[in-house]
Amino acid sequence: MKHKTLGTTGLQVSVVGLGTWAIGGGAWWGATDDQVSIRAIRAALDSGINLIDTAPVYGFGRSEEVVGKAIKANRDKVILATKCGLWWEDNRGAPFFEIDGRMVRRSLRPATIIQEVENSLRRLGTDRIDLLQTHWQAVEPEPTPIAETMACLLELKAQGKIRAIGVSNVTCAQMDEYRSAGVIDSCQPRYSMLDRAIEHALLPYCVKHGIATLVYSPLEQGLLSGTIGMDRHFSEQEHRNSIPWFKPEHRRKVLDLLAGWRDLTEKHHCTLSQLVIAWTVAQPGVTVALCGARKAEHAVENARAGFLTLEAAELARMRKEVEALGTAK
């Protein structure tokens, strides 16, 4: 497994990380089996992945609890990342979305961050979080100043409850504010070969300032695995329905593109998922590709992409062919 450095921490993280959003289940992801999820997490670790990314809001604590059970015997071998900033326990924060009968709010006020960290430590069964990330940024009517949020995070770090500070779903201007108040080691943005918006400013910014990037949805919710055919339908609430690339007219183009890469998968003895993940982690500025998996075999498949090296000409060819698809609306 290839590794890269997490910001200024010196921590070496696997270039493929395990994302655990789907493990939380709920309306977005449907039914999930905790024992199957635990086997998937352990399979990921056994296959060389050492970074696990979760969040309190994933299943309203369920994902963190499952992760905690899965890593109990191997805690010191895991770089554990979770988040703060999405709050549902009372009316503090700006309303964001409602799901499974709960209103989720954006709150980065120190009081809710401190409570979230205590809750996460308990659910994860650990005494420290290796990387705490602000999940979404504060907005009106409760725009907590970033300096106040950062002061709280730095205090938690001084207490030993967190080891590193990260941000997610931010702008470069917001990162400037974070950096003026302290050190951020990572940024977690959305990125896939079908959604390359962060290449224009955010990725170059992170490279310039030594900030690691943990990109999420590199397989575009499974579309880039080639296993979601034209006959697949999704329930009304399922998250994939909000992604334009899943519309039939766009999905057909993606599947045709992937079919054209058979020579590459045969040459490298890999699956389409592994080919796409390897391309992703080879892009300038990308540190880790966070790949979700609810089954052990999928976790193992994703992990093997971290051992794959593509040639410069192959990377360029794939980019050219992806760019020819244009955008989906």
Image: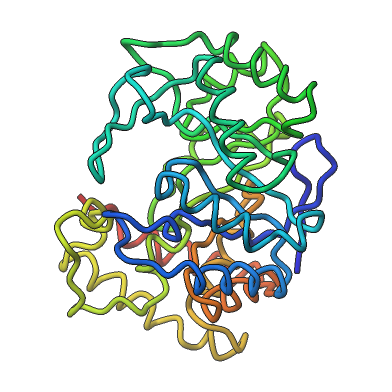
276 left or right of 321?
Answer: right
181 left or right of 273?
Answer: right
Relative to 302, does residue 319 appear above or below in the rendering?
Answer: above
Question: Viewer-proximal residue, 89 or 219?
Answer: 89
Where is residue 165? Give x, y as percent. Answer: 67, 30
Image quadrant in which the N terminus is located: bottom right
222 left or right of 51?
Answer: left
Where is residue 299? Give x, y as percent. Answer: 57, 73
Residue, x 51% and y 56% (percent of image)?
20
How many numbered callouts?
Answer: 0
Residue, x 27% and y 32% (percent of image)?
103
Question: Viewer-proximal residue, 62 or 1?
Answer: 62
Residue, x 74% and y 38% (percent of image)?
128
247 left or right of 179?
Answer: left
Where is residue 2? Give x, y as percent. Answer: 76, 64
The quadrant holding residue 212 is: top right
Question: Viewer-proximal residue, 128 or 213?
Answer: 128
Relative to 132, does residue 190 appear above or below in the rendering?
Answer: below
